[in-house]
Image (cartoon, helix red, strand yellow):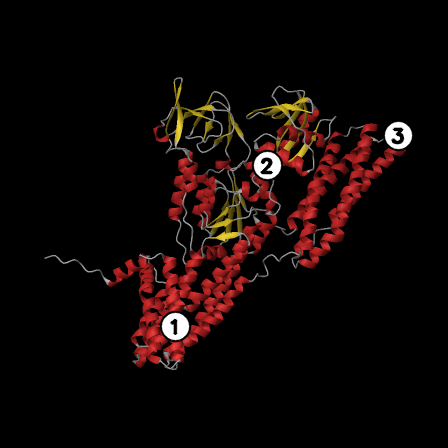
């Protein structure tokens, strides 16, 4: 006869605990233990000791099965955590009938587990958006027919049709007409690129132009996008589990506790003494104080727009010494902005920008949006275009104010006078892209666009170094030239450009060999690297869902300075958690010695442990308050002044464009027209630029000095203002000399040109320096 095997007690415990969702189990245990302790206290106060003992014993018994399940789970994973001491103490109090002590320990254990679960609940690293973005089918051309087929049926050398706005399904090569592609999903580069016939195209990029034919070079599973998904999965799987700070300390506190309890029992022969040692050794500083500090840090981070997915992540962030950063969308804004407007000799930059924006205002292209936004930010009234047509990869054509115009690329056979060649050279030196405005088929001007560094990027990196980060590295799929320029401007320690997702993972792994590593990114191509790093940080406000889901930390605001906030908060919270844990364990060790000597009963030891808990928890709650290194809140008056000055910088940028354009175009022998334009420019400088500088000196900087203890915010050198005023006066002096004499000599023209170029460079540098050092107002 076969008997059904009876489940073992430990197996039953594990299944019983597993049958209840973890957060609900811990919340229920906290409620039960708190009720048992309260009911027992009420019974004791009404002179019913038997009822009190029963309530406390029930509370202790209620905590044993789940705590045993937690300990067994930890042992299966290969480590004994702080909960083991609590389980031994619970069993000991029941054995020697010290039920009050058991109920107190049960409440502390339940409270600590609830806090820890709330602090360490972490979103799974799924790749849902990566998979949703990947195409499921493709259009295959067979002779004259085009048939929609499942992606798995695509074979090498099949000819596919990729329509406008569609995702390229497999790696291949362009056939026929040139393809215009948005490769930002893979490279992060926001500018569209062209791929001529025969050029390779990677899967996952988006067709930003007309439909084109593609000859497959690989199957779907062997293509680039599927490789990104596999890389992210592999990187996630290899990530080591976070070890709690409390468990690291328990590694030596647990054997020490057992040794002291065992020695007290052997020397005295008293089981009560051993239990008393276990009771006062219950690691409540680890069960409660450290999680309280961490949860407080998580709370402060969330109020700063930083979502940290677990207390363990916060602890690791506080110990990280290397930060790897993507460029596009992280250190830069991730979208092009107008940085220059160049006009033909007979036109003005304002006229060029207004006409280009008027024609572009109905275009969906990212560069067109940048042109239109720049015009509207400068208060320009746009004219309605007519007969608008757009050729992908070439630009828009139409009629504005009765004139035929085009905005986009300059045709290869278009005339290129000297000013056009100078504009192209300037764009090459500046690393910007040019959008040309042509009127009646002739170039009338150009708009320069670039993805500039965020204004707060340099200050953020300085704050990271101040928080203990020792190495800052740039990882990007962008071209080498803009990547190295950004690294030089920001003072980064290393730069790796033109990286594939595989290259980013390799760089992350190489850095992890030397220190705990944080990876910051925003694109789909960053998701594998975020999963591979010790801590992945996603720019979640505008970044891809894939990067946010593969990250441990999400910055909910589109501001990189939140990263410095998160690191500063994490460093302080971890430091307070360590202080609380070590301080509490030190007091517990002293109490253990007293208990081992027989001078402390278990119940009294439990009450003493409660006093230790209160002390360390109060210390841990300091994490809720801002530390000295964190940003102080700004007064409303300072916020208003900073915003006003920043808006004026935007408006004055057009004036500085005019300064540089004047320097470019002034001839060796200026005529009356040139002198008239110089007078108008000088008058604008006197009426707009100089009053702005004097108002900042008089109003903004005294307020910054009163509102901040950070000297870096209030010590912007006045040398730049002095030099700006000197150059403006010198330009005026040249005009006066020309008006009082026969004109300008060649030496005067050279000096005037140097003054104009110098004023442009110094004023732009001065604006950038101010905006970098000013605190953020959002």
Q: Position of residue 666 (x, y in %)?
A: 77, 30
Residue 112 image-quadrant placement: bottom left
Q: Is residue 515 visible?
A: no
Report if the CB atoms under discs 3 and 1 are less than 8 Å apart: no
Q: Secondary structure at mark 2?
A: loop
Compared to residue 580, the image places residue 640 above or below, namely above
Q: Is residue 305 visible?
A: yes
Q: Secondary structure at mark 3?
A: loop
Q: Position of residue 423 (x, y in %)?
A: 67, 29
Report how many numbered discs are placed on residues in the image: 3
Left of 442 or right of it: where is 668?
right
Foreground: disc 3 or disc 2: 2
Residue 451 image-quadrant placement: top right
Report the Cα–Cα distance between label 2 and label 1: 63 Å
Which residue is tagged 2?
336
Foreground: disc 3 or disc 1: 1
Residue 37's label in the rendered image is 1
Residue at the far front in the pictured view: 46
Residue 742's label in the rendered image is 3
Foreground: disc 2 or disc 1: 1
Q: Position of residue 193 (x, y in %)?
A: 53, 29
Q: Position of residue 116 (x, y in %)?
A: 42, 60
Looking at marks 2 and 1 on the same chain, the residue that comes earlier in the sequence is marked by 1
Left of 695 or right of it: where is 635?
left
Compared to residue 556, the image places residue 155 above or below, namely above
Report if the CB atoms under discs 3 and 2 are less than 8 Å apart: no
Looking at marks 3 and 1 on the same chain, the residue that comes earlier in the sequence is marked by 1
Compared to residue 201, the image places residue 463 above or below, namely below
Report the Cα–Cα distance between label 3 and label 2: 46 Å
Report the Cα–Cα distance between label 3 and label 1: 101 Å
Q: How many residues crowd mark 2 within 10 Å: few (<14), some (14–19), many (20+)?
A: many
Looking at marks 3 and 2 on the same chain, the residue that comes earlier in the sequence is marked by 2
């Amino acid at each position: 006869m076969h008997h059904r095997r009876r489940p073992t007690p430990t197996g039953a415990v594990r299944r019983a605990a597993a049958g209840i969702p973890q957060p609900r189990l811990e919340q229920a245990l906290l409620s039960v233990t708190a009720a048992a302790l309260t009911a027992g206290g009420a019974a004791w106060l009404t002179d019913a000791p038997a009822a009190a003992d029963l309530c406390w014993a029930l509370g202790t018994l209620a905590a044993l099965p789940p705590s045993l399940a937690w300990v067994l789970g930890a042992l299966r994973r290969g480590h004994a955590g702080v909960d083991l001491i609590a389980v031994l103490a619970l069993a000991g109090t029941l054995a020697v009938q010290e039920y009050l002590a058991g109920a107190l320990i049960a409440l502390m254990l339940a409270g600590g587990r609830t806090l820890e679960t709330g602090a360490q609940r972490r979103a799974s690293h799924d790749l849902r958006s990566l998979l949703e973005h990947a195409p499921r089918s493709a259009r295959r051309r067979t002779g004259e027919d085009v048939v929609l087929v499942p992606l798995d049926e695509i074979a090498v050398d099949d000819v596919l049709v990729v329509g406008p706005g569609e995702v390229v399904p497999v790696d291949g090569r362009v056939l026929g007409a040139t393809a215009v592609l948005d490769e930002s999903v893979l490279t992060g580069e926001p500018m569209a690129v062209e791929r001529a016939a025969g050029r390779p195209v990677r899967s996952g990029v988006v067709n930003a132009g007309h439909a084109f034919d593609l000859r497959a070079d690989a199957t779907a599973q062997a293509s680039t996008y599927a490789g990104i998904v596999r890389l992210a999965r592999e990187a996630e799987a290899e990530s080591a589990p976070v070890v709690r700070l409390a468990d690291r300390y328990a590694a030596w506190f647990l054997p020490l506790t057992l040794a002291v309890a065992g020695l007290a029992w052997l020397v005295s022969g008293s089981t009560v003494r051993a239990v008393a040692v276990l009771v006062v050794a219950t690691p409540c500083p680890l069960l409660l104080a450290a999680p309280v500090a961490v949860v407080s840090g998580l709370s402060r981070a969330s109020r700063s727009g930083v979502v940290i997915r677990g207390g363990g992540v916060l602890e690791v962030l506080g110990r990280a010494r290397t930060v790897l950063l993507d460029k596009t969308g992280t250190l830069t804004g991730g979208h092009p902005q107008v940085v220059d407007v160049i006009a033909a000799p007979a036109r003005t930059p304002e006229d060029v920008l207004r006409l280009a924006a008027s024609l572009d205002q109905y275009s969906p292209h990212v560069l067109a949006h940048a042109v239109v936004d720049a015009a509207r930010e400068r208060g320009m009234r746009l004219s309605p275009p007519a007969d608008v047509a757009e050729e992908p990869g070439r630009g828009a054509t139409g009629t504005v104010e009765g004139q035929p115009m085009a905005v986009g690329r300059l045709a290869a056979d278009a005339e290129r006078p000297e000013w056009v060649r100078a504009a192209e050279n300037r764009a090459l030196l500046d690393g910007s892209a040019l959008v040309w405005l042509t009127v009646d088929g002739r170039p009338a001007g150009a708009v320069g666009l670039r993805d500039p560094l965020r204004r707060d990027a340099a200050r953020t990196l300085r704050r990271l170094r101040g928080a203990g980060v020792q190495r800052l590295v740039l990882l990007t799929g962008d071209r080498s030239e803009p990547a190295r320029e950004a690294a030089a401007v920001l003072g980064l320690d290393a730069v790796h450009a033109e990286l594939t997702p595989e290259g980013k993972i390799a760089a992350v792994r190489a850095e992890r060999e030397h220190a705990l590593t944080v990876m910051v990114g925003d694109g789909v191509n960053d998701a594998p690297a975020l999963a591979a790093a010790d801590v992945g940080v996603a720019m979640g406000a505008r970044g891809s869902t894939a990067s946010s889901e593969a990250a441990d930390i999400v910055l909910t605001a589109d501001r990189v300075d939140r990263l410095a906030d998160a690191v500063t908060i994490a460093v302080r919270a971890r430091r307070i958690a360590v202080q609380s844990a070590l301080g509490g364990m030190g007091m517990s060790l002293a109490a253990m010695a007293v208990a081992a000597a027989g001078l402390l009963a278990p119940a009294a030891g439990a009450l003493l442990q409660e006093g230790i808990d209160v002390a360390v928890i109060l210390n841990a709650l300091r994490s809720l308050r801002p530390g000295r290194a964190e940003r102080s809140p700004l007064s409303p008056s300072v916020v208003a002044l900073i915003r006003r000055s920043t808006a004026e910088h935007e408006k004055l940028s057009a004036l500085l464009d005019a300064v540089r354009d004047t320097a470019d175009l002034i001839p060796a022998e200026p005529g009356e027209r040139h002198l008239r334009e110089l007078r108008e420019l000088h008058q604008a400088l006197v009426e707009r630029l100089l009053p702005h500088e004097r108002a900042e000196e008089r109003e903004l900087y005294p307020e910054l000095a009163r509102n901040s203890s950070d000297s870096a915010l209030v010590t912007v050198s006045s040398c730049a203002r002095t030099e700006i005023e000197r150059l403006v006066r010198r330009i005026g002096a040249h005009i006066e000399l020309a008006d009082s004499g026969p004109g300008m000599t060649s030496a005067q023209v050279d000096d005037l040109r140097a003054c104009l170029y110098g004023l442009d460079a110094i004023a732009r540098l001065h604006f950038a320096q101010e905006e970098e050092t000013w605190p953020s107002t959002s």
